[in-house]
DNA sequence: CTGCCCATCCCCCGAACGTGGGATGTTCAC
DNA sequence: GTGAACATCCCACGTTCGGGGGATGGGCAG
Protein backbone atom coordinates (compact mmCIF):
# COMPACT_ATOMS: atom_id res chain seq x y z
CA UNK A 1 0.00 0.00 0.00
CA UNK A 2 1.56 3.24 -1.16
CA UNK A 3 1.29 6.36 0.93
CA UNK A 4 -0.46 9.28 -0.77
CA UNK A 5 1.58 12.48 -0.87
CA UNK A 6 0.74 16.07 -1.70
CA UNK A 7 3.24 18.85 -2.31
CA UNK A 8 2.73 22.55 -1.68
CA UNK A 9 5.46 24.76 -3.10
CA UNK A 10 5.08 27.98 -5.07
CA UNK A 11 8.26 27.78 -7.10
CA UNK A 12 7.44 25.67 -10.10
CA UNK A 13 10.92 24.29 -10.71
CA UNK A 14 11.35 23.29 -7.09
CA UNK A 15 7.87 21.82 -7.04
CA UNK A 16 8.63 19.61 -10.00
CA UNK A 17 11.92 18.51 -8.53
CA UNK A 18 10.12 17.49 -5.37
CA UNK A 19 7.41 15.75 -7.37
CA UNK A 20 10.03 13.82 -9.29
CA UNK A 21 11.63 12.65 -6.06
CA UNK A 22 8.33 11.41 -4.74
CA UNK A 23 7.46 9.68 -8.01
CA UNK A 24 10.70 7.75 -8.07
CA UNK A 25 10.01 6.22 -4.68
CA UNK A 26 7.93 3.11 -5.03
CA UNK A 27 6.52 3.37 -1.54
CA UNK A 28 5.01 6.77 -2.28
CA UNK A 29 2.22 7.88 -4.57
CA UNK A 30 1.99 11.51 -5.64
CA UNK A 31 -1.60 12.69 -5.40
CA UNK A 32 -1.10 16.34 -6.19
CA UNK A 33 1.36 19.23 -6.33
CA UNK A 34 0.04 22.71 -5.63
CA UNK A 35 1.46 26.18 -6.07
CA UNK A 36 -0.42 27.87 -3.27
CA UNK A 37 -1.89 27.20 0.13
CA UNK A 38 -5.34 28.09 -1.16
CA UNK A 39 -5.16 25.54 -3.92
CA UNK A 40 -3.94 22.87 -1.54
CA UNK A 41 -6.76 23.56 0.89
CA UNK A 42 -9.32 23.37 -1.90
CA UNK A 43 -8.08 20.18 -3.51
CA UNK A 44 -6.65 18.10 -0.69
CA UNK A 45 -9.70 16.90 1.20
CA UNK A 46 -10.86 14.92 -1.81
CA UNK A 47 -7.46 13.31 -2.27
CA UNK A 48 -7.19 12.02 1.29
CA UNK A 49 -3.40 12.27 1.42
CA UNK A 50 -1.35 10.62 4.15
CA UNK A 51 1.66 12.90 3.83
CA UNK A 52 2.24 16.51 2.85
CA UNK A 53 5.41 18.31 1.83
CA UNK A 54 4.87 21.97 2.67
CA UNK A 55 6.99 24.95 1.76
CA UNK A 56 6.89 27.46 4.58
CA UNK A 57 7.23 30.55 2.46
CA UNK A 58 4.21 30.81 0.18
CA UNK A 59 2.54 33.83 -1.38
CA UNK A 60 -0.58 34.99 0.39
CA UNK A 61 -1.33 32.40 3.01
CA UNK A 62 1.83 31.04 4.61
CA UNK A 63 2.68 27.38 4.80
CA UNK A 64 2.25 27.54 8.54
CA UNK A 65 -1.32 28.73 8.34
CA UNK A 66 -1.93 26.19 5.60
CA UNK A 67 -0.76 23.37 7.85
CA UNK A 68 -3.07 24.52 10.55
CA UNK A 69 -6.07 24.55 8.26
CA UNK A 70 -5.23 21.31 6.53
CA UNK A 71 -4.97 19.57 9.86
CA UNK A 72 -8.43 20.77 10.77
CA UNK A 73 -9.86 18.96 7.78
CA UNK A 74 -7.43 16.03 7.79
CA UNK A 75 -6.40 15.47 11.38
CA UNK A 76 -4.34 12.40 10.55
CA UNK A 77 -2.32 14.13 7.85
CA UNK A 78 1.42 14.11 8.52
CA UNK A 79 3.31 17.19 7.43
CA UNK A 80 6.94 17.65 6.51
CA UNK A 81 7.90 21.32 6.38
CA UNK A 82 10.47 22.63 3.92
CA UNK A 83 12.20 25.94 4.39
CA UNK A 84 15.12 28.04 3.35
CA UNK A 85 14.93 29.93 6.60
CA UNK A 86 16.23 28.52 9.83
CA UNK A 87 15.04 31.25 12.13
CA UNK A 88 13.53 29.85 15.25
CA UNK A 89 10.36 31.83 15.09
CA UNK A 90 9.26 29.99 11.96
CA UNK A 91 10.36 26.67 13.34
CA UNK A 92 8.33 26.88 16.48
CA UNK A 93 5.29 28.37 14.84
CA UNK A 94 5.34 25.56 12.31
CA UNK A 95 5.66 22.93 15.01
CA UNK A 96 2.79 24.48 16.89
CA UNK A 97 0.68 24.42 13.78
CA UNK A 98 1.21 20.68 13.65
CA UNK A 99 4.27 19.98 11.53
CA UNK A 100 5.78 16.52 12.03
CA UNK A 101 9.19 17.14 10.53
CA UNK A 102 11.27 20.02 9.30
CA UNK A 103 13.90 20.00 6.57
CA UNK A 104 15.92 22.85 5.16
CA UNK A 105 15.68 22.88 1.40
CA UNK A 106 19.28 22.09 0.77
CA UNK A 107 18.70 18.73 2.48
CA UNK A 108 15.59 18.00 0.47
CA UNK A 109 17.07 16.40 -2.64
CA UNK A 110 18.98 13.90 -0.61
CA UNK A 111 16.66 13.22 2.28
CA UNK A 112 13.12 13.95 1.20
CA UNK A 113 11.85 10.45 0.62
CA UNK A 114 13.60 9.00 3.65
CA UNK A 115 12.19 11.78 5.76
CA UNK A 116 8.70 11.09 4.45
CA UNK A 117 9.00 7.47 5.50
CA UNK A 118 10.31 8.43 8.84
CA UNK A 119 7.36 10.75 9.35
CA UNK A 120 4.96 8.03 8.31
CA UNK A 121 6.46 5.54 10.73
CA UNK A 122 6.27 7.69 13.81
CA UNK A 123 9.43 9.71 13.54
CA UNK A 124 10.09 13.43 13.27
CA UNK A 125 12.97 14.00 10.88
CA UNK A 126 14.68 17.32 11.23
CA UNK A 127 17.73 18.85 9.60
CA UNK A 128 20.59 18.99 12.08
CA UNK A 129 20.42 22.68 12.74
CA UNK A 130 16.68 22.60 13.22
CA UNK A 131 16.84 19.69 15.63
CA UNK A 132 19.43 21.47 17.69
CA UNK A 133 17.25 24.52 18.01
CA UNK A 134 14.29 22.43 19.06
CA UNK A 135 16.34 20.63 21.68
CA UNK A 136 17.85 23.85 22.89
CA UNK A 137 14.40 25.18 23.51
CA UNK A 138 14.32 22.94 26.54
CA UNK A 139 17.71 23.79 27.95
CA UNK A 140 17.38 25.73 31.11
CA UNK A 141 19.29 28.91 30.64
CA UNK A 142 19.86 30.32 34.07
CA UNK A 143 20.73 28.94 37.42
CA UNK A 144 18.58 30.41 40.21
CA UNK A 145 21.59 32.30 41.60
CA UNK A 146 22.28 32.12 45.30
CA UNK A 147 19.79 30.82 47.76
CA UNK A 148 19.65 34.08 49.67
CA UNK A 149 18.45 35.79 46.54
CA UNK A 150 15.42 33.59 46.10
CA UNK A 151 12.09 35.19 46.93
CA UNK A 152 10.60 34.44 50.33
CA UNK A 153 7.39 32.38 50.43
CA UNK A 154 5.28 35.48 50.76
CA UNK A 155 7.07 37.09 47.88
CA UNK A 156 6.61 34.02 45.75
CA UNK A 157 2.92 34.08 46.55
CA UNK A 158 2.69 37.63 45.32
CA UNK A 159 4.76 36.79 42.28
CA UNK A 160 2.20 34.18 41.34
CA UNK A 161 -0.58 36.69 41.59
CA UNK A 162 1.39 39.04 39.38
CA UNK A 163 1.64 36.24 36.84
CA UNK A 164 -2.12 35.95 36.93
CA UNK A 165 -2.28 39.53 35.79
CA UNK A 166 -3.60 41.11 38.97
CA UNK A 167 -2.73 44.72 39.70
CA UNK A 168 -1.29 45.73 43.04
CA UNK A 169 -4.62 46.85 44.41
CA UNK A 170 -6.25 43.53 43.57
CA UNK A 171 -3.40 41.63 45.18
CA UNK A 172 -3.77 43.73 48.31
CA UNK A 173 -7.48 42.97 48.48
CA UNK A 174 -7.06 39.28 47.81
CA UNK A 175 -4.41 38.90 50.50
CA UNK A 176 -6.11 41.26 52.91
CA UNK A 177 -3.05 43.48 53.27
CA UNK A 178 -2.31 47.08 52.40
CA UNK A 179 -1.46 48.35 48.96
CA UNK A 180 1.83 49.74 50.17
CA UNK A 181 2.79 46.42 51.64
CA UNK A 182 2.27 44.77 48.32
CA UNK A 183 4.35 47.46 46.69
CA UNK A 184 7.18 46.78 49.10
CA UNK A 185 7.07 43.05 48.47
CA UNK A 186 7.09 43.60 44.76
CA UNK A 187 10.09 45.88 45.01
CA UNK A 188 11.91 43.24 47.03
CA UNK A 189 11.08 40.70 44.33
CA UNK A 190 12.58 42.97 41.69
CA UNK A 191 15.75 43.33 43.69
CA UNK A 192 16.14 39.61 44.17
CA UNK A 193 15.48 38.76 40.55
CA UNK A 194 17.63 41.64 39.34
CA UNK A 195 14.91 43.12 37.22
CA UNK A 196 13.31 46.50 37.01
CA UNK A 197 9.81 45.82 35.87
CA UNK A 198 6.87 43.56 36.44
CA UNK A 199 7.13 42.15 32.97
CA UNK A 200 10.75 41.10 33.40
CA UNK A 201 9.95 39.52 36.74
CA UNK A 202 7.08 37.51 35.34
CA UNK A 203 9.09 36.34 32.34
CA UNK A 204 11.98 35.27 34.54
CA UNK A 205 9.65 33.44 36.87
CA UNK A 206 7.90 31.55 34.08
CA UNK A 207 11.11 30.67 32.30
CA UNK A 208 12.93 29.15 35.20
CA UNK A 209 10.57 26.59 36.41
CA UNK A 210 8.01 28.57 38.33
CA UNK B 1 41.76 16.22 15.57
CA UNK B 2 39.79 13.46 17.24
CA UNK B 3 36.91 14.28 19.52
CA UNK B 4 37.31 13.03 23.10
CA UNK B 5 34.45 10.84 24.30
CA UNK B 6 33.42 9.55 27.71
CA UNK B 7 30.86 6.86 28.37
CA UNK B 8 28.69 6.51 31.46
CA UNK B 9 26.81 3.23 31.65
CA UNK B 10 26.43 0.91 34.64
CA UNK B 11 26.02 -2.38 32.81
CA UNK B 12 29.51 -3.62 32.12
CA UNK B 13 28.71 -5.58 28.97
CA UNK B 14 26.81 -2.71 27.42
CA UNK B 15 29.54 -0.29 28.45
CA UNK B 16 32.16 -2.36 26.69
CA UNK B 17 30.05 -2.67 23.59
CA UNK B 18 29.68 1.08 23.48
CA UNK B 19 33.38 1.56 24.11
CA UNK B 20 34.20 -0.78 21.25
CA UNK B 21 31.96 1.19 18.91
CA UNK B 22 33.68 4.43 19.82
CA UNK B 23 37.14 2.91 19.48
CA UNK B 24 36.43 1.65 15.98
CA UNK B 25 35.59 5.14 14.77
CA UNK B 26 38.70 6.97 13.71
CA UNK B 27 37.18 10.39 14.29
CA UNK B 28 36.58 9.62 17.96
CA UNK B 29 38.92 9.04 20.86
CA UNK B 30 37.70 7.20 23.94
CA UNK B 31 38.90 9.02 27.06
CA UNK B 32 37.06 7.02 29.68
CA UNK B 33 34.18 4.66 30.40
CA UNK B 34 32.52 4.86 33.80
CA UNK B 35 30.07 2.68 35.65
CA UNK B 36 28.45 5.39 37.74
CA UNK B 37 27.55 9.05 37.70
CA UNK B 38 29.77 9.68 40.70
CA UNK B 39 32.80 8.21 38.99
CA UNK B 40 32.13 10.22 35.86
CA UNK B 41 31.83 13.43 37.82
CA UNK B 42 35.09 12.74 39.62
CA UNK B 43 37.16 11.80 36.61
CA UNK B 44 35.78 13.82 33.73
CA UNK B 45 36.98 17.34 34.43
CA UNK B 46 40.59 16.22 34.04
CA UNK B 47 39.87 14.52 30.75
CA UNK B 48 38.24 17.51 29.09
CA UNK B 49 35.92 15.46 26.91
CA UNK B 50 34.02 16.95 24.00
CA UNK B 51 31.27 14.33 23.92
CA UNK B 52 29.55 12.15 26.47
CA UNK B 53 27.41 9.05 26.03
CA UNK B 54 25.15 8.90 29.05
CA UNK B 55 22.87 6.11 30.18
CA UNK B 56 19.79 7.56 31.77
CA UNK B 57 19.19 4.78 34.25
CA UNK B 58 22.11 4.61 36.66
CA UNK B 59 22.32 3.41 40.26
CA UNK B 60 22.28 6.17 42.85
CA UNK B 61 22.56 9.38 40.92
CA UNK B 62 20.59 9.30 37.68
CA UNK B 63 22.03 10.10 34.32
CA UNK B 64 19.88 13.20 34.19
CA UNK B 65 21.32 14.59 37.39
CA UNK B 66 24.76 13.62 36.16
CA UNK B 67 24.30 15.59 32.96
CA UNK B 68 23.25 18.62 34.93
CA UNK B 69 26.33 18.48 37.14
CA UNK B 70 28.72 17.66 34.34
CA UNK B 71 27.49 20.64 32.38
CA UNK B 72 28.18 22.89 35.32
CA UNK B 73 31.83 21.93 35.22
CA UNK B 74 32.11 21.48 31.46
CA UNK B 75 29.63 23.86 29.88
CA UNK B 76 30.71 23.03 26.36
CA UNK B 77 30.31 19.29 26.79
CA UNK B 78 27.84 17.75 24.34
CA UNK B 79 25.75 14.91 25.69
CA UNK B 80 24.04 12.05 23.92
CA UNK B 81 21.54 10.28 26.15
CA UNK B 82 20.91 6.55 25.92
CA UNK B 83 17.80 4.96 27.31
CA UNK B 84 15.65 1.89 27.28
CA UNK B 85 12.71 3.96 28.39
CA UNK B 86 10.80 6.16 26.04
CA UNK B 87 8.53 7.80 28.53
CA UNK B 88 8.24 11.47 27.92
CA UNK B 89 8.96 12.55 31.43
CA UNK B 90 12.51 11.27 31.21
CA UNK B 91 12.95 12.76 27.79
CA UNK B 92 12.00 16.24 28.80
CA UNK B 93 13.88 16.16 32.05
CA UNK B 94 16.99 15.06 30.20
CA UNK B 95 16.59 17.81 27.64
CA UNK B 96 16.16 20.38 30.36
CA UNK B 97 19.30 19.12 32.03
CA UNK B 98 21.15 19.86 28.83
CA UNK B 99 21.15 16.73 26.67
CA UNK B 100 21.92 17.34 23.00
CA UNK B 101 20.62 14.10 21.56
CA UNK B 102 18.63 11.10 22.65
CA UNK B 103 18.85 7.53 21.38
CA UNK B 104 16.99 4.45 22.50
CA UNK B 105 19.42 1.64 23.21
CA UNK B 106 18.25 -0.60 20.45
CA UNK B 107 19.40 2.08 17.99
CA UNK B 108 22.78 2.44 19.65
CA UNK B 109 24.75 -0.29 17.92
CA UNK B 110 23.83 1.01 14.54
CA UNK B 111 23.72 4.74 15.04
CA UNK B 112 25.94 5.63 17.97
CA UNK B 113 28.97 6.96 16.13
CA UNK B 114 26.94 8.77 13.51
CA UNK B 115 24.88 10.34 16.24
CA UNK B 116 28.00 11.47 18.06
CA UNK B 117 29.20 13.23 14.94
CA UNK B 118 25.88 14.81 14.40
CA UNK B 119 25.93 16.13 17.93
CA UNK B 120 29.42 17.48 17.47
CA UNK B 121 28.48 19.27 14.29
CA UNK B 122 25.49 21.14 15.61
CA UNK B 123 22.76 18.55 15.24
CA UNK B 124 20.50 16.86 17.73
CA UNK B 125 20.07 13.22 16.75
CA UNK B 126 17.05 11.52 18.19
CA UNK B 127 15.50 8.12 17.71
CA UNK B 128 12.33 8.38 15.69
CA UNK B 129 9.95 7.86 18.55
CA UNK B 130 11.78 10.35 20.74
CA UNK B 131 11.82 13.00 18.05
CA UNK B 132 8.12 12.60 17.55
CA UNK B 133 7.43 13.14 21.21
CA UNK B 134 9.58 16.22 21.29
CA UNK B 135 7.84 17.66 18.27
CA UNK B 136 4.45 16.77 19.65
CA UNK B 137 5.24 18.77 22.72
CA UNK B 138 4.74 21.84 20.59
CA UNK B 139 1.54 20.87 18.88
CA UNK B 140 -1.20 23.23 19.81
CA UNK B 141 -4.34 21.76 21.14
CA UNK B 142 -6.44 24.86 21.22
CA UNK B 143 -7.31 27.12 18.39
CA UNK B 144 -5.88 30.58 18.95
CA UNK B 145 -9.38 31.93 18.44
CA UNK B 146 -10.17 33.23 15.00
CA UNK B 147 -7.45 34.16 12.61
CA UNK B 148 -8.50 37.77 12.65
CA UNK B 149 -7.76 37.85 16.34
CA UNK B 150 -4.18 36.79 15.96
CA UNK B 151 -1.64 39.57 16.26
CA UNK B 152 -0.25 40.87 12.99
CA UNK B 153 3.47 40.38 12.29
CA UNK B 154 4.23 43.85 13.48
CA UNK B 155 2.23 43.32 16.61
CA UNK B 156 3.98 40.05 17.28
CA UNK B 157 7.29 41.80 16.87
CA UNK B 158 6.32 44.32 19.49
CA UNK B 159 4.97 41.60 21.72
CA UNK B 160 8.36 39.96 21.67
CA UNK B 161 10.03 43.17 22.71
CA UNK B 162 7.55 43.48 25.55
CA UNK B 163 8.54 39.99 26.64
CA UNK B 164 12.14 41.13 26.71
CA UNK B 165 11.11 43.71 29.29
CA UNK B 166 11.50 46.82 27.18
CA UNK B 167 9.34 49.82 28.00
CA UNK B 168 7.31 51.53 25.32
CA UNK B 169 9.88 54.24 24.79
CA UNK B 170 12.66 51.74 24.23
CA UNK B 171 10.53 49.81 21.77
CA UNK B 172 9.84 53.00 19.87
CA UNK B 173 13.55 53.78 19.67
CA UNK B 174 14.53 50.27 18.68
CA UNK B 175 11.96 50.11 15.89
CA UNK B 176 12.46 53.70 14.84
CA UNK B 177 8.79 54.59 15.24
CA UNK B 178 6.89 56.95 17.48
CA UNK B 179 5.96 56.26 21.07
CA UNK B 180 2.28 56.70 20.33
CA UNK B 181 2.48 54.24 17.49
CA UNK B 182 3.85 51.65 19.84
CA UNK B 183 1.09 52.43 22.29
CA UNK B 184 -1.50 51.85 19.58
CA UNK B 185 0.03 48.53 18.58
CA UNK B 186 0.13 47.42 22.17
CA UNK B 187 -3.50 48.31 22.64
CA UNK B 188 -4.42 46.29 19.58
CA UNK B 189 -2.49 43.37 21.03
CA UNK B 190 -4.47 43.64 24.25
CA UNK B 191 -7.72 43.61 22.36
CA UNK B 192 -6.78 40.59 20.31
CA UNK B 193 -5.53 38.61 23.26
CA UNK B 194 -8.45 39.71 25.42
CA UNK B 195 -6.26 41.04 28.16
CA UNK B 196 -6.00 44.35 29.92
CA UNK B 197 -2.38 44.60 30.91
CA UNK B 198 1.10 44.03 29.68
CA UNK B 199 1.65 41.29 32.20
CA UNK B 200 -1.37 39.29 31.06
CA UNK B 201 -0.35 39.69 27.44
CA UNK B 202 3.16 38.47 28.10
CA UNK B 203 1.98 35.49 30.11
CA UNK B 204 -0.51 34.52 27.46
CA UNK B 205 2.10 34.85 24.78
CA UNK B 206 4.63 32.72 26.64
CA UNK B 207 2.13 30.06 27.55
CA UNK B 208 0.51 29.57 24.19
CA UNK B 209 2.02 31.58 21.46
CA UNK B 210 5.65 32.17 21.59
C1' DC C 1 20.93 40.34 73.61
C1' DT C 2 21.78 41.90 69.28
C1' DG C 3 21.48 41.51 64.80
C1' DC C 4 19.17 40.07 60.61
C1' DC C 5 15.40 38.73 57.80
C1' DC C 6 10.71 38.81 57.12
C1' DA C 7 6.10 40.83 56.82
C1' DT C 8 3.59 44.62 57.56
C1' DC C 9 2.35 49.61 57.08
C1' DC C 10 2.85 54.61 55.43
C1' DC C 11 4.20 58.77 52.27
C1' DC C 12 5.95 61.21 48.05
C1' DC C 13 7.05 61.91 43.25
C1' DG C 14 7.91 61.50 38.56
C1' DA C 15 7.68 58.30 34.96
C1' DA C 16 5.24 54.92 32.59
C1' DC C 17 1.02 52.93 31.39
C1' DG C 18 -4.00 52.01 29.67
C1' DT C 19 -7.94 54.17 27.46
C1' DG C 20 -10.31 57.01 24.59
C1' DG C 21 -10.45 59.76 20.64
C1' DG C 22 -8.93 61.04 15.66
C1' DA C 23 -5.93 60.97 11.39
C1' DT C 24 -3.26 59.31 7.00
C1' DG C 25 -1.39 56.16 3.62
C1' DT C 26 -0.76 51.26 1.72
C1' DT C 27 -2.06 46.97 0.39
C1' DC C 28 -4.91 43.50 -0.84
C1' DA C 29 -9.45 41.04 -1.25
C1' DC C 30 -13.87 41.05 -3.11
C1' DG D 1 -12.93 50.87 -6.46
C1' DT D 2 -14.71 50.24 -2.18
C1' DG D 3 -13.66 48.54 2.02
C1' DA D 4 -11.12 46.09 5.44
C1' DA D 5 -6.87 45.42 7.71
C1' DC D 6 -2.58 47.19 8.75
C1' DA D 7 1.07 50.48 10.15
C1' DT D 8 1.97 54.88 11.22
C1' DC D 9 1.30 59.26 13.87
C1' DC D 10 -0.80 62.56 17.48
C1' DC D 11 -3.23 64.24 21.91
C1' DA D 12 -5.29 64.18 26.66
C1' DC D 13 -6.75 62.07 30.85
C1' DG D 14 -6.51 59.52 34.97
C1' DT D 15 -4.38 55.48 36.96
C1' DT D 16 -0.72 52.58 38.09
C1' DC D 17 4.01 51.71 38.80
C1' DG D 18 8.89 51.90 40.45
C1' DG D 19 12.21 54.07 43.44
C1' DG D 20 13.20 56.62 47.24
C1' DG D 21 12.49 57.25 52.23
C1' DG D 22 11.22 55.58 57.13
C1' DA D 23 8.68 52.62 60.79
C1' DT D 24 7.00 48.52 63.72
C1' DG D 25 6.86 43.87 65.47
C1' DG D 26 8.08 38.85 65.33
C1' DG D 27 11.25 35.14 64.95
C1' DC D 28 15.52 32.92 64.88
C1' DA D 29 20.86 32.50 65.16
C1' DG D 30 24.96 33.72 66.78
Image (tube, coloured by chain):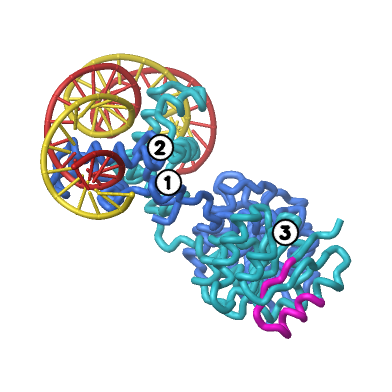
Chain colours: A blue, B cyan, C red, D yellow
State how far apart marks 2 and 1 are (Cα): 9 Å
Which residue, given by chain and number where applicable, does mark 3 sit on? Answer: B46
The structure residue drawn at horizontal position 43% and vertical position 42%, both measured from the top left corner, is: B151
- Whether tag 2 and tag 1 are in contact, CB under 8 A, the answer is yes
User: x, y (%) of residue A39?
Assistant: 59, 55
Q: Main secondary structure of the magenta part?
A: helix
Q: Secondary structure at mark 1?
A: helix
Q: Confirm whether the magenta stretch covers residue B17.
A: yes
Q: Confirm whether the magenta stretch covers residue A17.
A: no
B137 sits left or right of B196 in the view: right
Residue A45 visible, this orientation = no
User: x, y (%) of residue D5?
Assistant: 42, 38
Q: What is the span of residues highlighted in magenta in the rendered image? A: B6-20
| The quadrant where residue B185 appears | top left
The residue mark sitting in front, 1 or 3, is: 3
Which residue, given by chain and number where applicable, does mark 1 sit on? Answer: A204
> A170 above or below D3?
below
For residue A78, which numbered disc appears in the image? none
The residue mark sitting in front, 3 or 2, is: 3
Which residue, given by chain and number where applicable, does mark 2 sit on? Answer: A195
A82 sits left or right of B21 in the view: left
Q: Nearer the viewer, residue B33 or B76?
A: B33
First in residue order: circle 2 vs circle 1: 2
> D18 above or below A42?
above
Amino acid sequence: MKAGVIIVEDNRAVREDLAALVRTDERLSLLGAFGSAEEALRESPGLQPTLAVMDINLPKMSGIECVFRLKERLPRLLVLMLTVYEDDDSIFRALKAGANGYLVKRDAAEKLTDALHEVQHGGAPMSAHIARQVVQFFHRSERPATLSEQPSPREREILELLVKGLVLKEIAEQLGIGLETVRTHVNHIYQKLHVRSRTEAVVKYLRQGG
